[in-house]
């Protein structure tokens, strides 16, 4: 039996041909496809500027540097991939952590307020697993305290709050095009979105060696450009994104219908009147997570843990004295991601659900 993959990057003939055309007809670095991709992505998100970079991590780093967050504190979540926290450090800043909501793993606005002090100058909320944070509350806190907001939307391409796309709500948004994301570029890639022309110009400089003119540099920059071939693939994938996201939502609803009511299995939120998810992952919570993973593996079903070690327990941050973060630590012990991608067949999903049901039936005797 073929294994059921947790994710499956898409690369069809149209995308391959777009890459070949870019190789034949454009500059390899700084070709026309890069600028077209930026324009199209900005229009899709609903912002004036989008700046393509070499990865989601670089998007976060360059955004934090552009926002002048060195020597100050930025509040973020411990329940995320480490790049969210690393970006703050690489920008010369200090991390402050606020615990998350148990029901969806997103940063808890009440805990953000507890983490505030006079050195906090920014909030970096992460739209975890493709579900938007409570951005109404985040933006209220930011407004009341004159804080910059950088959205980590690396898992949330197309998600929205009250009809507004994430990445267009805060001062800047950061996206990743790593192959497992909701859309990709055929390799690493990222994007910074903003309505602020000065911030966009600074990110453009930073991605290109701090270049003001060809051999004149007025900031300490990086080589963080997105190459033309990747941008050409990204343009095609962007046109597919809405359809892929709709497929993910249908699959999430089907999962919910088949798994609801199982004791000790907490499912992600499916319906929300103000926040529309794009289900980058279908992450469930259960007390016997590791046993369930082993059982599913024996049945040919791939799973993953996102994330087994929260930021506050990462060795790289052992010199920090973080507050107690019990919800994040609990979710790191309980969360398991089931297969989720737009080409997942319904009969494959049904088989995954049957295996999950069998596991709990055996445990409960």
Image (cartoon, rainbow, N blue to C red):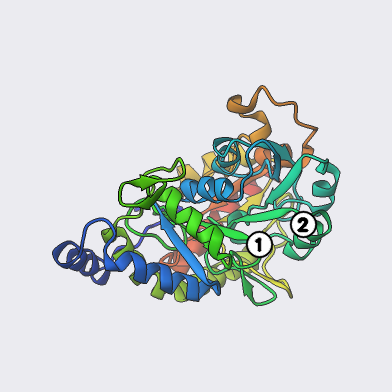
x, y percent for residue 225: 36, 52
- How many numbered marks does the figure carry? 2
Q: Are marks 2 and 1 in contact (CB under 8 Å)?
A: yes
| Other residues around mark 2 within 10 Å, as few (<14) / some (14–19) / many (≥20) | some
**Label 2 – label 1 distance at C-alpha:** 9 Å
Q: Which image quarter: residue 231?
A: bottom left
Would residue 5 appear left or right of 81 to someone viewing this image?
A: left
Q: Residue at left 64%, top 45%?
A: 335
Q: Which mark is residue 119?
A: none
Q: Residue at left 63%, top 27%?
A: 317
Quadrant into which the C terminus falls? top right
Which residue is disc 1 drawn over? 170
| Other residues around mark 1 within 10 Å, as few (<14) / some (14–19) / many (≥20) | many
Of all residues shown, which one is farthest toward the left? Answer: 24
Would residue 57 appear left or right of 260 to someone viewing this image?
A: left
Query: If you read the primary sequence from the N terminus, does the residue marked by circle 2 or circle 1 appear first?
Result: 2
- 93 or 273, which lies in front? 93
Q: Which image quarter: residue 99?
A: top right
- 306 or 261, which lies in front? 306
Which residue is disc 2 drawn over? 142
Residue 38 visible in the displayed image: yes
Q: Residue at left 62%, top 67%?
A: 277
Would residue 61 appear left or right of 271 to someone viewing this image?
A: left
Q: Secondary structure at mark 2?
A: helix
x, y percent for residue 183: 43, 63
x, y percent for residue 68: 61, 46
Would residue 98 appear left or right of 204 to someone viewing this image?
A: right
Q: Which image quarter: residue 172?
A: bottom right
x, y percent for residue 146: 78, 55
Residue 357 visible in the displayed image: no
Q: Secondary structure at mark 1?
A: loop
Q: Residue at left 68%, top 32%?
A: 312
């Amino acid at each position: 039996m073929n294994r059921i993959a947790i994710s499956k990057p898409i690369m069809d003939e149209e995308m391959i041909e777009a890459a070949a055309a870019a190789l034949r007809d454009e500059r390899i670095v700084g070709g026309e496809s890069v600028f077209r991709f930026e324009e199209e992505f900005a229009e899709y998100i609903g912002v004036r500027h989008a700046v393509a970079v070499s990865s989601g991590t670089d998007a976060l780093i360059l955004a934090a540097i552009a926002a002048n967050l060195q020597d100050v504190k930025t509040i973020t979540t411990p329940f995320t991939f480490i790049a969210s926290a690393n970006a703050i450090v690489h920008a010369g800043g200090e991390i402050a952590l606020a615990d998350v909501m148990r029901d969806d793993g997103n940063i808890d606005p009440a805990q953000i307020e507890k983490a505030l002090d006079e050195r906090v100058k920014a909030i970096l909320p992460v739209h975890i697993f493709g579900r938007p944070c409570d951005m109404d509350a985040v933006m209220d806190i930011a407004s009341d305290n004159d804080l910059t907001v950088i959205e980590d939307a690396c898992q949330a391409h197309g998600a929205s709050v009250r009809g507004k796309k994430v990445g267009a709500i805060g001062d800047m948004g950061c996206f990743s095009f790593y192959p497992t994301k909701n859309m990709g570029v055929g390799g690493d890639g990222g994007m910074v979105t903003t309505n602020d022309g000065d911030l966009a110009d600074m990110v453009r400089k930073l991605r290109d060696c701090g270049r003001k003119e060809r051999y004149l540099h007025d900031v300490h920059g990086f080589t963080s450009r997105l190459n033309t071939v990747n941008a050409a693939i990204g343009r095609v994938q962007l046109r597919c994104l809405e359809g892929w996201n709709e497929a993910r939502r249908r699959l999430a609803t089907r999962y919910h219908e088949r798994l609801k009511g199982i004791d000790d299995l907490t499912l992600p939120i499916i319906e929300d009147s103000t926040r529309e998810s794009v289900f980058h992952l279908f992450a469930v919570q259960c007390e016997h997570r590791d046993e369930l993973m082993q059982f599913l593996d024996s049945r040919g079903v791939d799973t993953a843990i996102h994330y087994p070690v929260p930021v506050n327990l990462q060795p790289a941050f052992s010199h920090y004295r973080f507050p107690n973060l019990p919800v994040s630590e609990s979710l790191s012990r309980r969360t398991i991601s089931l297969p989720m991608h737009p080409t997942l067949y319904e009969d494959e999903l049904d088989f995954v659900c049957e295996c999950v049901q069998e596991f709990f039936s055996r445990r409960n005797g």
